Amino acid sequence: MRTLIFLILLTAPVAHSQTVSPVSVEYKKTARGILTATNNGITPLVVVLEPASIGRVQGKPTVSKLSTDVHLDISEMSFRLPPKSSHTVSYKATCDTNCGFAIFARFSGLHTTEGITLALHIPTLVFICSDKAKDCKPRILASFDNK
């Protein structure tokens, strides 16, 4: 029990120090967006962007390799993020059919006093529908249940 409390106390400041925005966005036909990674901490970090497809299998959320139906161009895939700073990355995406995917920002560079490297993965969820952006996210999430 003491170990669990120690781990929670150890990682709590880390989780509040890094953010990615926006959390979720919806587009019609083509996504032209930006995501902003912020490091509110006092340690420089390396951020690597990792796109992935999202879905649901037997009611449970899944993350997998980015589908070939998603055509994604990201301005940069990794960068160094100094303390108390933000960095913005642009992207453009299209899909062969309605789709949802995530762009995970993996923050790394933090270490515990025992030498364990910590990495924090925070996603931006992108939903693209062919007809209209409004209510795109719930329609795509509902379609996962029908597959």
Image (cartoon, rainbow, N blue to C red):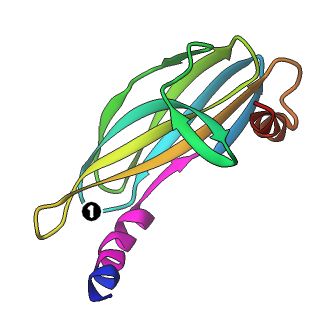
- Residue 14 place in picture, x, y as percent: 35, 65
For the record, the magenta segment spans 7-21
- Residue 108 or 66: which is nearer the viewer? 66
At label 1, which amino acid type do we have? Ile
Query: In percent of the image, x 83 and y 29: which residue is there?
Result: 133
Query: In percent of the image, x 70 and y 38: which residue is there?
Result: 25
- Residue 9 place in picture, x, y as percent: 33, 79
- Residue 140 or 127: which is nearer the viewer? 140
- Residue 44 place in picture, x, y as percent: 24, 51
Q: Secondary structure at mark 1?
A: loop
Residue 54 part of the magenta segment: no
Secondary structure that dominates the magenta span = helix
Query: In percent of the image, x 77 and y 16: which residue is there?
Result: 29
Please give the residue where the numbered disc 1 appears in the rendered image. Answer: 42
* Apparent side of residue 55 relative to residue 43 in the rendered image (left or right): right
- Residue 107 or 52: which is nearer the viewer? 52
- Can see residue 145? yes
